[in-house]
């Protein structure tokens, strides 16, 4: 019997998390990857295997971003979320890709929450989320 070995703890967390996360056309997966210098965000439909929207700090408009890495991650998250809304996506599933939910990864998620893409009810055209409109 083959026992899978993981090269590091992040890959082990990634495998555990990805088991329960699937991006569908109605609710695609927002995947975050961070390196030491850059951050990358993709909106992925796992059923067709296509990337619906993407943003990163490598792009020319964000390349010369002034501020710390968390602020740059927030800008990348906002750009990716706006591109997703422009394509008609109203709900997302957040995939932290095995990274701990802190710092730059949390900054990307926070922006998607603010835009209503990661709430339980999703984005509405008026900018209100279902959780906020119930109050």
Image (tube, rainbow, N blue to C red):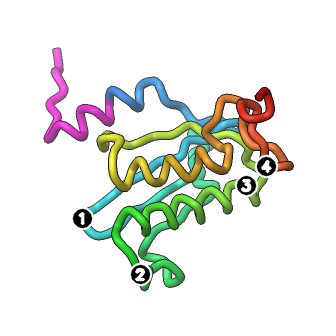
- The residue wearing badge 4 is 127
Find the distance from the CA under tag 4 to the CA under tag 2.
28 Å
Would you say residue 111 sits in the magenta stretch?
no
SS type, badge 4 = loop
SS type, badge 2 = loop
Observer-nearest of 6 and 65: 65
Pointers 4 and 2 in contact (CB under 8 A)? no
- The residue wearing badge 1 is 36
Q: Quadrant of the N terminus?
A: top left
Would you say residue 9 sits in the magenta stretch?
yes
Circle nearer the viewer, 1 or 2: 2
Along the polypeptide, which appears first: circle 1 or circle 2? 1
SS type, badge 1 = loop
Q: Is residue 32 above or below residue 67?
A: above
Task: Work out which residue is located at the far top of the displayed protein and give it.
Answer: 1
- The residue wearing badge 3 is 85
Image-based side of 14 in relation to 55, left or right:
left
How many numbered marks appear?
Answer: 4
- The residue wearing badge 2 is 66
Q: Quadrant of the C terminus?
A: top right
- Rendered location of residue 34, percent (x, y): 33, 57
């Amino acid at each position: 019997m083959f026992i899978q070995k993981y090269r590091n703890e992040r890959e082990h967390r990634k495998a555990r998390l990805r088991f329960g996360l699937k991006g569908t056309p109605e609710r695609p997966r927002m995947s975050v990857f961070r390196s030491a210098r850059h951050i990358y965000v993709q909106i992925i439909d796992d059923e067709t295997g296509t990337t619906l929207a993407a943003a990163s700090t490598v792009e020319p408009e964000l390349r010369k971003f002034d501020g710390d890495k968390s602020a740059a991650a927030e800008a990348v998250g906002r750009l990716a979320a706006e591109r997703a809304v422009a394509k008609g996506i109203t709900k997302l599933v957040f995939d932290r890709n095995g990274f701990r939910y802190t710092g730059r990864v949390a900054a990307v998620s926070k922006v998607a929450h603010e835009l209503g893409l990661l709430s339980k009810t999703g984005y509405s055209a008026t900018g209100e989320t279902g959780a906020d409109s119930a109050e």
